[in-house]
Amino acid sequence: MNKGIERSAEVMPRLLGAKELQAYTGLGANKSAELGKNAGAVRRYGKRVLYDRLKVDAYIENEMQEV
């Protein structure tokens, strides 16, 4: 056992699936996928399409500064 490693129950994953991205951004399926693409956050792992949360955050921060 790894007794020296503590695990937190509140771990936010770096890579989000489509449904997780929708919940994270509060957008629908099409708009969240568009946001992920525009942010350059799309990561493919086999057949799975995942979105880099840090890229999404940076994109949103950058867009908010322009408004």
Image: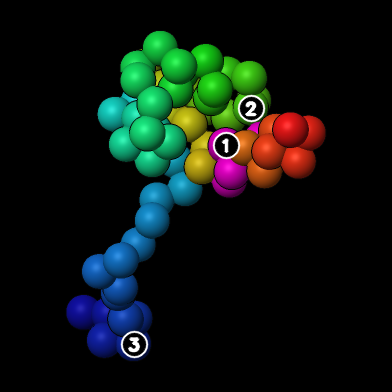
Check the image and report above or below for 34 versus 22: above
Helix, strand or loop at mark 3: loop
Q: Confirm whether the magenta stretch covers residue 16.
A: no
Question: Spatial distance from mark 1 to mark 3, Cα to Cα?
Answer: 33 Å
Helix, strand or loop at mark 1: helix
Q: Quadrant of residue 16?
A: top left
Which secondary structure is most common in the magenta stretch? helix
Check the image and report above or below for 64 versus 8: above
Q: Residue at x 53, y 24 (%)?
A: 36
Q: Mark 1 is on which residue type?
A: Val
First in sequence, mark 3 or 2: give its number.
Answer: 3
Q: Are marks 1 and 3 in contact (CB under 8 Å)?
A: no
Give the residue pinned by disc 2: 39
Q: Quadrant of residue 10?
A: bottom left
First in sequence, mark 1 or 2: give its number.
Answer: 2
Quadrant placement of the C terminus: top right
Tag nearer the camera, 3 or 2: 2
Q: Mark 2 is on which residue type?
A: Ala
Which residue range is magenta in the image?
Answer: 54-59
Q: Is 51 positioned to the left or the right of 16 in the image? A: right
Q: Are marks 1 and 2 in contact (CB under 8 Å)?
A: yes
Question: Spatial distance from mark 1 to mark 2, Cα to Cα?
Answer: 6 Å
Give the residue pinned by disc 3: 4
Question: Crowdedness of circle 3 by 10 Å Cα count: few (<14), some, many (20+)?
Answer: few
Give the residue pinned by disc 1: 56
Q: Mark 3 is on which residue type?
A: Gly
Residue 46 shows in this picture: no
Which is more toward the observer, 29 or 15? 29
Question: Spatial distance from mark 3 to mark 2, Cα to Cα?
Answer: 37 Å
Helix, strand or loop at mark 2: loop
Which is more toward the observer, 11 or 67? 67
Which is more toward the observer, 45 or 62? 62
